[in-house]
Amino acid sequence: MVDCKETKLRYRADQLFCAPVNLAEDGTNLGYVCVHESTDEQMMKDAKKMAKKVLKEADKKGEKIEPFLFKDLTEVDEDVMTQVPSPGSGKPTLTMPRDFNLMFQTNVGAMSDASSVAYLRPETAQGIFINFKNAQGTSRAKVPFGIAQIGKAFRNEITPRNFIFRSREFEQMEVEYFIPPGGEEVWKPYHEKWLEDSKNFLVSVGLRDDLMGWDVHEGDSLAHYALACTDVTFRFPFGEQELMGIAARGDFDLTQHSEGSGKALDYYCDQAKEKYIPHCIEPSLGVDRLVLALICSAYAEDIVDGEKRSYLKFHPSVAPVKVSVLPLLKNKPALVSVARELFEKLQRRWNVQWDASGAIGRRYRRADEVGTPFCITVDFDTIEKEGKTVTIRDRDTTEQIRLPMDEVIPYLSEKIDGY
């Protein structure tokens, strides 16, 4: 981390990027710019704004400069640091980078001494590795197999920012998929299959394929223990961000826990008649980011009956509210009682909504705005004609069909659950 000696603000050194301001004509250095980690477009915009100020102070206003070559502050030496402006003060008042702990420290028990020190987990994965032997033995799972987990993770971010992307507490989903050991010919097919399946999963729950991309980690951006790592990125309205990472971690984690604890975390393969420490593929996904990406993918606008409509086009499987039940008139007990009976039946299967106030068109719009895929209207045909049919309206097409009440649940089950 680095500190600003003037403003007393503190930053993560790997999240601040500096670049020299050099004249294009002769390469003369006029100073440096320093910007927060963000999208490429935003970093360029911020850097250009700061460069104009540097040019003005050097009496070189309007001069052309060389393209920015960004480095994070962990890569700069002391001479450069004396020229890098602080984001807080705009002057070169930053300290040299120094280490800090990304984990939250706490104490367990009544005493607060060295023996009671513990840390909140920075990721969910390590609990899986510690329990590998227990989970594999009790489930009698054979390699390849996976263990999935969802839960809270905590990071000691110095400057929480960027909406949900730099927060101290977040929800994380991870899978540790254990595979046989071996070279690239062994782990690479598993890694590529997880890349394909992960993309297909994200599309199946409603993410727009045209907004997703790949970011392959190579060279210095690849963690020291990883054999390969590829991120699935998503283009949010404010820029492209990492959504999910799929890493081939080798046997690093199980080996480290085994060496640290003195307990063998190996696996006996019946077919090969040998013991080995499995390698693993780790898909890791931020739940908060996924939900935001789903909302961004689902937002849509169209024209219905000459009026603009804004709605959320959630896939039925992930829509928070699956069905809205609407009695045509709330002051007709016969309609309300039948609609209520249907509502209570659907409530046993899904999260459904009851809405009896306002014009029917207004109620449709309210349901559309929260992404409810189906609205069921109970009208006078339901109670007066044979068959007891109701109207089911589709959110996306606004088309309506009539079905007997005893066919409603099978119809919705196929649309929502897929069977």
Image (cartoon, rainbow, N blue to C red):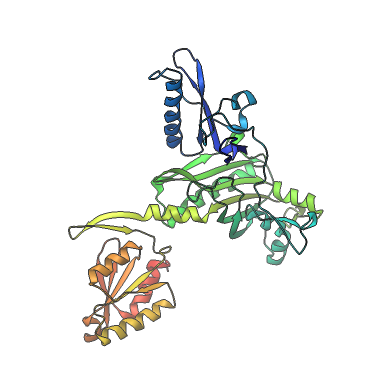
Q: Locate residue 180 relative to residue 398 in the image: left or right.
A: right
Q: Residue at x 31, y 70 (%)?
A: 375
Residue drawn at x 33%, y 68% is 374
Q: Is residue 359 left or right of residue 411?
A: left
Quadrant in the rendering for residue 125 = bottom right
Q: Is residue 201 visible?
A: no
Q: Is residue 332 above or below residue 79?
A: below
Q: Is residue 123 visible?
A: yes
Q: Residue furthest front?
A: 6
Which quadrant is home to the N terminus? top right
Q: Residue at x 22, y 72 (%)?
A: 359
Closer to us: 301 or 84: 84
358 over 229 or under it: above or below: below
Say how many tags the image has. Answer: 0
List x then y, in percent, for residue 201: 48, 55
Q: Is residue 290 above or below residue 248?
A: below
Q: Quick check: 110 left or right of 220?
A: right
Q: Residue at x 54, y 48 (%)?
A: 160
The C terminus, quarter of image: bottom left
Q: Nearer the viewer, residue 49 or 394?
A: 49
Q: Where is residue 410 shown, x and y percent of the image?
A: 38, 74
Image location (x, y in percent) of residue 76: 61, 28
> In front here: 180 or 212?
212
Query: Residue 187 placed where, x, y %?
Result: 63, 45
